[in-house]
Image (cartoon, rainbow, N blue to C red):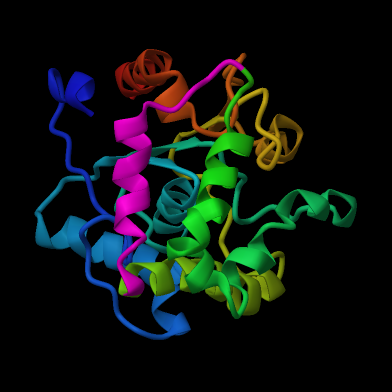
Amino acid sequence: MPALAETHHVIALDLRGAGWSDVPEGTEAYDKRVIADEVARAIEVLGLDRPVLVGHDWGAWTSLLVASRHQGVVRGVVAAAIVAPWEDVPWYQMWRFAYQPIAGGPGGALLHRRAGQVLLKTIFRAGASRRFRWERGVREEYLARFRDPARARAGQSMYRAFLLKEIPQLGRGYARRVDDVPLLFLPGTGDLVLAPALVRRAEGPPNVTVTEISGTGHWIPEERPAELVGHVRDFLRQL
């Protein structure tokens, strides 16, 4: 973000329940469509003129939903390590998401904050490329937020809402295909969950570009920050 802020106006939003945002109770509040509508409202309140949204994982999924649900609000989307919410995932690829029922299940909140936070630490480690090592201070910044019981419940609810309310509607009108603004998908070649083969299912329309980030896993912003900034700047120049 500091690198992009040298040349552009950068606003960083904590998604509901994450970072230093509010943490409302209830699964409904963490439906990504609800969060996307909230982001669109933030764009309106801040008086932004069709910003470009840049997101990773849930942030990228939410950014794509903003473009899908609110035509004319954004100028484009850069989506790192995520699939398109209007594309289905083949049943034989569902094994990649086996961790989600654990994170969103009855003990999900407890696992986010207790037991040595082994769930989050395992996800951090398994999602990274073989050579990448998290800086202790950076990883601790994420872990510390989830030691708050309310934020741990929010983390659980992000997955629970997805499992109970969103996945059943994928491919059944969950999201409109975005064809009116440019989209750049950036999958990591070593991402075990959001693999490039799944991300490339969005290819075809002329507004969609998929560029693989080689030698990286799921944590593209942490593993390849300079390369990510380069892709974002190229995308902005093309606009």
Q: Is residue 140 left or right of residue 134?
A: left
Identify the residue shown where x is 20% and y is 58%. Answer: 20
**Is residue 204 in view from this perspective?**
no
Which residue is depicted at the point 61% across and 14% down? Answer: 215
Magenta residues, start to end = 131-149
Task: Return the x and y of residue 60 as percentages of the image width and height.
Answer: 45, 46
Quadrant (top left, top right, bottom left, bottom right) of the C terminus: top left
> Where is 234 relative to 122, above or below?
above
Q: Quadrant of residue 37?
A: bottom left
Residue 147 in the image, given as x and y percentages of width and height:
34, 62
Magenta region includes residue 132: yes
Q: Residue at x 15, y 25 (%)?
A: 5
**Position of 163 relative to 60 (above/below):** below
Give the total number of marks visible in the rendering.
0
Where is residue 187 shown, x and y percent of the image? 59, 30
Q: Which percent across, then down, holds residue 74?
A: 31, 47
Comparing 121 with 78, the one in front is 121
In front: 223, or 62? 223
Rendered residue at 60%/80% (across/down): 106
Classify residue 194 as left or right of residue 22. right
